[in-house]
């Protein structure tokens, strides 16, 4: 198939509209002599005169008019195909975001707003292993992670911190703590606490799957969980207990589980939008900016996103501006 003279075809279509070499040159952003060259080149390839030009007027010949009538719709369809392919090419490289355990309403509301304001940017979501909050991000498999703090890896930075969430202990109906509303963290020394199965940093595991109470009492942990649902199922047996945050408790009501408030920790659970320390792409900074904007308060039992971002120094990690 011979090469299509795309530039010559475009020139002829514009000339057919304008019937003026000067205005055609302006639209193409070329000189008038270049317009003449393009028309002449197309006429040579077609093998007939397409434009009748004199010092007084420009008109299509009968062959030229017939050619434009037949070629115009085909050229328009070709341009649409190219434009569609270009749009698909943009969408072919989505923003990849991982999340731990559960993407509750605060998170999904931010993603919805981002998608509405950036319709040409596709979002790809994947669940992260409970015991490996940063691995996919460090390996470049995702662009950002919504994961529990703290994060102390120098190659990772925090773009946004979600509001704090109280600690809860998930226990089965038959567990000795099932009828208790609130316990101090020191009481964890008397339970078999679900541990994490994965390569999460030790400092991170010490916060979310502690081996010692705040005063140093050892905490028993004889079973591991790879996912949130696996850990909750273990707790539901009544033999084990699992530390979670209040959003998890609110969004996982089960008749075989009870959730007990836990006090006495230095800080509450906090999720954050985390990305690699190298300058993040503009779309990620847009997402972080959207998350900072106050949202309408959700209905009962839902968390609302606060507008202010806490200081990074309060959480032992770096936060990008």
Image: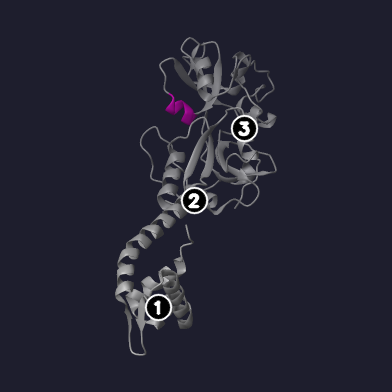
The dominant secondary structure in magenta is helix
Q: Which residue is disc 3 drawn over?
A: 266
Q: What's drawn in magenta, residue-wise?
A: 246-252
Identify the residue shown where x is 39% and y is 80%.
23
> Nearer the observer, disc 1 or disc 2?
1
Mark 2 or mark 1, which is nearer the start of the sequence?
1
Q: Nearer the viewer, residue 319 or 94?
A: 94
| Left or right, 40 with reference to 145 | left
CA distance separating discs 3 and 1: 72 Å
Identify the residue shown where x is 52% and y is 20%.
230
Q: Which residue is disc 1 drawn over?
A: 24
Question: Among all residues in the image, which is located at the extreme front?
Answer: 47
> Nearer the observer, disc 3 or disc 1?
1
User: Percent position (x, y) of residue 61?
Assistant: 31, 77
CA distance separating discs 1 and 2: 31 Å
Identify the residue shown where x is 36% and y is 87%.
54
Disc number for residue 89 = 2
SS at circle 3: loop
Q: Is residue 296 above or below residue 216?
A: below
Mark 3 or mark 2, which is nearer the start of the sequence?
2
Q: Nearer the viewer, residue 302 or 53?
A: 53
User: Percent position (x, y) of residue 149?
Assistant: 60, 36
Q: Nearer the viewer, residue 185 or 44?
A: 44
Q: Is residue 135 above or below residue 191?
A: below
Where residue 42 sits, quadrant-wise, is bottom left
SS at circle 1: helix
On whether residue 247 falls in the magenta region, the answer is yes
SS at circle 2: helix
Neighbourhood count class around disc 1 (C-alpha, 10 Å): few under 14, some 14–19, many 20 upward: many
CA distance separating discs 2 and 3: 48 Å
User: Percent position (x, y) of residue 41?
Assistant: 46, 74
Q: Are marks 3 and 1 in contact (CB under 8 Å)?
A: no
């Amino acid at each position: 198939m011979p090469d299509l003279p795309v530039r010559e075809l475009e020139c002829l279509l514009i000339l057919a509209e304008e019937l003026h070499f000067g205005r055609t040159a302006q639209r193409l952003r070329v000189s008038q002599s270049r317009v003449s060259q393009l028309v002449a080149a197309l006429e040579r390839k077609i093998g007939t005169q397409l434009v009748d030009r004199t010092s007084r007027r420009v008109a299509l010949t009968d062959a030229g008019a017939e050619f434009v009538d037949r070629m115009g719709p085909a050229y328009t369809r070709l341009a649409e195909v190219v434009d569609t392919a270009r749009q698909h090419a943009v969408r072919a490289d989505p923003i990849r975001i991982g999340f731990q355990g559960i993407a509750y309403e605060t998170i999904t509301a931010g993603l919805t707003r981002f998608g509405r304001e950036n319709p040409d940017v596709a979002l790809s979501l994947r669940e992260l292993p409970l015991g490996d909050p940063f691995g996919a991000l460090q390996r470049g498999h995702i662009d950002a992670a919504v994961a529990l703090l703290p994060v102390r890896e120098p190659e990772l930075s925090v773009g946004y911190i979600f509001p704090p969430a109280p600690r809860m202990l998930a226990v089965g109906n038959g567990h000795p703590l099932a009828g208790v509303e609130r316990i101090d963290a020191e009481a964890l020394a008397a339970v078999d606490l679900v541990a994490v199965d994965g390569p999460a940093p030790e400092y991170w595991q010490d916060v979310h799957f502690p081996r010692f109470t705040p005063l140093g009492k050892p905490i028993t942990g004889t079973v591991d969980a790879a996912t949130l649902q696996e850990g909750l199922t273990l707790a539901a047996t009544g033999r084990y207990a699992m530390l979670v945050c209040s959003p998890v408790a609110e969004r996982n009501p089960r008749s075989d589980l009870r959730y007990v408030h836990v006090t006495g920790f230095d800080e509450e659970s906090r999720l954050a939008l985390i990305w690699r320390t190298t300058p993040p792409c503009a779309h990620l900074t847009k997402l972080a900016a959207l998350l900072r904007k106050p949202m309408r308060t959700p209905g009962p039992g839902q968390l609302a996103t606060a507008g202010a971002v806490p200081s990074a120094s309060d959480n032992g990690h770096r936060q990008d501006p």
